[in-house]
Image (cartoon, coloured by chain):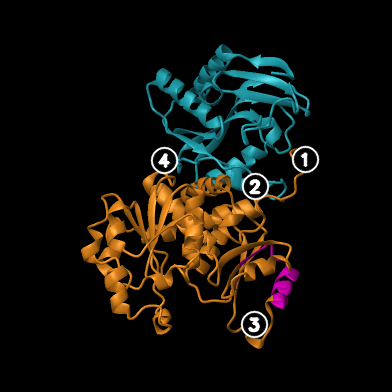
Amino acid sequence: MGGTKARLLDGAEIRRSVTRIAHEILERNKGAGEVALVGIANRGDDLARRLAAEIERIEGEQVPVGALDITFYRDDIGMRAEAPEVHETRIGFDINGRTVVLVDDVLFTGRTIRAAMDALVDFGRPTAIQLAVLVDRGHRELPIRPDYVGKNVPTRKDEDVRVMLAELDGEDAVILEERGAAPRSPAGKAAKGDER
Amino acid sequence: MNRHLLSIHDVSAVDIVRILDTAESFREVGTRVIKKVPALRGRTIVNLFYENSTRTRISFELAAKRLSADVINFTTSGTSVSKGESLKDTALTLQAMGADAIVIRHSSSGAPFTLTKWVKGSVLNAGDGTHEHPTQALLDMYTMRERLGKIEGLRVAIVGDVLHSRVARSLSFGLVKMGAEVTLVGPPTLIPPEAPSWGVQVSYDIDGVLPKLDVCYMLRVQRERQRQQYFPSVREYSRLFGLTNARVGMLPEGSLIMHPGPMNRGVEIDSDVADLPQSVIEEQVTNGIAVRMSLLYLLLGGTGVEEASADV
């Protein structure tokens, strides 16, 4: 792919990161008991399912997994040419009294997470909300900090971090690109960093 | 997408799929404890209804409120319109008050189009004369797709007073655009002579059509039409074109019965038939809110201006 500057994580490294984060979630919450995972669409929901599978493998317990679309909670609706594309929200369990771990692929400005927290509290009142991300690339614009990080990557604002997952993209990889290098279609599949 | 929704001709087949897919997400919002999202916070939507309406107006109002927009309901009685204010002046007044979108129902065909020349915001046609009612067609297509899994290839009959029905026009155009096979059924006096040019079939014999249908869509009989001699009597109409208890058995298993409401039970549809499990008339109403949320979101959620504003 033209414009690729570096491969930040390969498939095996992503797998190890997911395994480590699964262990950290269990350690921090003293087991899987009240934990639920909610992934932010796209790709966050796939990561959440992988984390849940790891937790089940380690602990032998199934944790509920949901998918959250934050489009309706974005702070830039009406500022772009087209209304942002909407994905599916699926939270088939009661979040009241649970510790909900929000899962996303890339943490950048923090605005997606702000929107996700707003969306989540419309479903109920979780005991706590924690945040797990595969890549933290910095440049926060809001006071938001992740609890679990796959890899910290110092970036420039004009770079893009692209996460590819087998479920959507056919392979597992995280790459660093020059902004505008990747084709922006199909809509909504652009790199996370570029979106907000 | 076009900034306005005046006619089904304003949206392409791709747009229709996008509208229905987005409506799917809004259906999910309707199942939450808090059925409201902040997507259109701070926007003002005006319901400008020059004709009586219950379900369409309430549906639009609920849709706008669930998107957190501010809604103003403007009906003709008890307002400046009853003092003789023209549509243009009413529109300019609403515009001066900062309306981002106007949902209009008017007895004159073309009134929504005229409105677009005076206002800057989006205009949504909620039924104009005997012209079109595009949001009804979209919610009907949503209901068909949800229940039957697709629209393409569906065999749909639209039965009744097609001539005066804006619903029939919009739905025919939409279904043909999506690749369904549409048959219009009714007395010859109530089928518009130009109907074959819409890409639909025409039949005057409901019994010949029913056994081959996926969807039987009944239109409301407007009783005043009988006085205008379009058909001899309501009883005769009901016997020849009503979906009666005796007739409903001719529909294939798994087919749907639909009606845009308000129904005349015992005229175009027997009361028991309207309450059958295969009748999805109430689902149409529920889906209407989601489809109108989708439309308002897609029309008002962007600036409509192509510009590089990615870095917000």
Determine which of the numbered discs, if any, sits on residue B308 in the image. 1
The verdict on residue B92 being magenta is: yes
Determine which of the numbered discs, if any, sits on residue B206 in the image. none
Residue B276: name its quadrant.
bottom left
Badge 2 and badge 1 both on one subunit: no
Q: Secondary structure at mark 3?
A: helix
> Disc 3 marks which residue?
B81
> Disc 4 marks which residue?
A93
Give, as a single range, the part of the protein colored magenta: B88-103
> Badge 3 sits on which subunit?
B
- Above or below B205: residue A79: above
Q: Secondary structure at mark 2?
A: loop
> Badge 4 sits on which subunit?
A
Q: In the rendered image of this protein, which colour is used for chain A?
A: cyan
> Spatial distance from mark 3 to mark 2, Cα to Cα?
34 Å
Q: In the rendered image of this protein, which colour is used for chain B?
A: orange
Q: Is residue A174 left or right of residue B194?
A: right
Mark 3 and mark 2 residues within 8 Å of each other at the beta carbon? no
What is the quadrant of the C terminus of chain B in the image? top right
State which mark lies toward you, 1 or 4.
1
> Disc 2 marks which residue?
A83
Question: Which sits in the foreground, B299 or A146?
Answer: B299
Label 4 CA crowd tier, 10 Å (few <14, some 14–19, many 20+): few
Q: Residue at x 73, y 74 (%)?
A: B93
State which mark lies toward you, 4 or 3.
3
The verdict on residue B207 being magenta is: no
